[in-house]
Image (cartoon, helix red, strand yellow):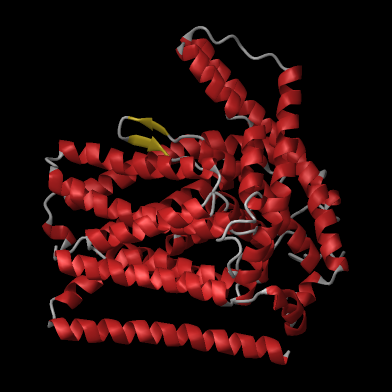
Amino acid sequence: MSVTRGSYTQSQKLMTFVLSMSLYGLATLISELIPSVQVGIVEFSVEFFLFIPLAIAMLFDPLSAALGAATGELVFSEIMLGQFGGIGELEKFLTVTIALYVAGTLVKDPRNMKAVALVSFGCTALQLAMSAGVDICKVAFAVEEFEAVPGLPESVYFTEGFAFANDLLFSGILFCMLPTMFLVPRLYGKIEPLLGMKPRTPENAPAAPSAGLVIAAVACFAVAVAVACFSEAGFSLIEWEAEWAESETAIFTGIVVSAVVALVAAFWAHRNAQLRSA
Amino acid sequence: MIEKISESVLDKVSVDFLRDQVLKNAYGNDDTPIAALDPRVLLLWYLFFGIVPWFLNDVIVLLGFFILTVVTTRVARVAPLVLFVFALGIFSQTGYTFIVSLFFEGDLDTLLSLLVLTLKVATCSLASITVFSGLDPDRLSNGLLWFGVPERLSFSIAFAYRVLPILMEELQNILLSYRLRGRAPAHDTLAGKVRWLIYQVRIVIQSFYPLMLNTAKRSRTTVEALELKGYRYASTNLKVLKIKLSSLHAGRREAVFVAISVAWVVLCFVVSKIVGL
């Protein structure tokens, strides 16, 4: 294997993906079944097992590890348990992927405990900050004339900020930093040969995310925020449709329904033809 | 008495029980009418019931949709554990919000608007339970593949169901061996209880260390086996897809299913018009 920066073969990436997916999937499946701890109005919505993909992202290819963890969570705990929430899951998928990927690229040498500790804490902070931001945006867009409702903005900022600080202190240190500091030095040098790779050193560490990738990630995140807001706010669509004359509503609905049916039928025929001609 | 009940509940909720339920959910209901349907049709059906309820605010129509998804979930014979998790999620969320709203001068109107929200969430969840739990994982991933979903996702679904029982058993074995070798602190006093909790959490975290090493070995074997079969090229090759997806067939049964669903949806709208809420 060459010692160039961030050189992982396709099959090594796939191995990392499978490893991170199955482990984090199993862990989230278990944590889904643990009832969330509630003390008063404070809910400890802890990502109990974020330390697993975090350790994998620090030791192997960060992007595969991050994508694997997010996919594992989606498949094991959402689809297998039938908790799949549709487009709203996009937000969680992206925040987990981005946070893990950034954390994985920041650690140049897994033997440096100070970096591991700082980055694992920062990863939780990043993930929590992104979800809190999405939640605030949701409320801001969902409630019309957000500022006009007395006391609402303050209370949302307060509860979100409080949940953020509380989750960060609780899950960031107890369930993310300490286990990662326990696992990474123990796994270092032992787990890499099992996947046929060299341990990560400052020389062969993956390159920091390129500018294009950062822009793509920010764009993806913006789309996710928009989707999340839409899934919360866009539901009055039919209501203001109903304010029109009765017949116009019927025509409008008819046009939408037939357009959707035509679209589905066209896609169906296209895909069938594509497969038949292959 | 209470001790006995909690003991029997704890007995039931073991890793073995979880594994059995997940397996039963995945492979135990191949013979239901839902499982026999074409996965592509079911996925489209899910898209309708996963998206459309969010745009409706009519209680009667939503109730109709909800009843339909309840029936399909019943027909799909979903494992009790999945339904339990679903019910827990729905009721804890709505009930909690209602209790909080009571403090802020909420009344029956609040309950009604909460009911609408709950119906929407419940309809979407039940539709997803019907489709994703009622279908055989292989058929599900074939259906997704047909729609051009990234190969990795459909592979993950098929793989997850197979590997999960093995992983669970292994985790349980490791946990048990840690318990055998260690000594849990006495938990009579409050301080002891805290120590006991910390001890348990530490064991779970520690047992992921051997599990990670074992899984690393296993994932290498898996990927090497996939490479031997030419997985990475096969997943993008249309000829291979054609052979792989040739088992999908939408026919009369699917038409009947779609017709019943459409008729029910139309009926819901008609009833709500007549009642005129």
As drawn, A4 above or below B204: below
B217 vs B96, left or right, is right
Out of A33 and A55, give the one closest to the viewer: A33
In x, y percent, where is residue B214?
80, 42
Q: Residue at x 67, y 46 (%)?
A: A23
Image quarter of residue A229:
bottom left
Which residue is at the front of the view, A10 or A267? A267
Residue depicted at x 64% and y 45%: B24
Residue at 82 percent of width and 55 percent of height: B220
The reply, left or right, for residue A73 in relation to residue B183 is: left
Query: In which quadrant of the rendered view does residue A189 lie?
Result: top right
- Please tell me which residue is depicted at 27% across the width and 49% down the height of the picture: A157
- B229 up-or-down from B162: above or below: below
Q: Position of residue A97 (x, y in %)?
A: 56, 59
Say which of B70 and A221 sits in front.
B70
Image vertical order of residue B196 relative to residue A147, above or below: above
Q: Is residue A275 left or right of residue B62?
A: right
Q: Quadrant of the C terminus of chain B?
A: bottom left
Q: Is residue A234 visible?
A: no
Question: Is B168 drawn above or below residue A108 in the view shown?
Answer: above
Give percent across and percent down for residue A231.
35, 64
Q: Is residue B222 visible?
A: yes
Query: How many discs mark residues in the rendered view?
Result: 0
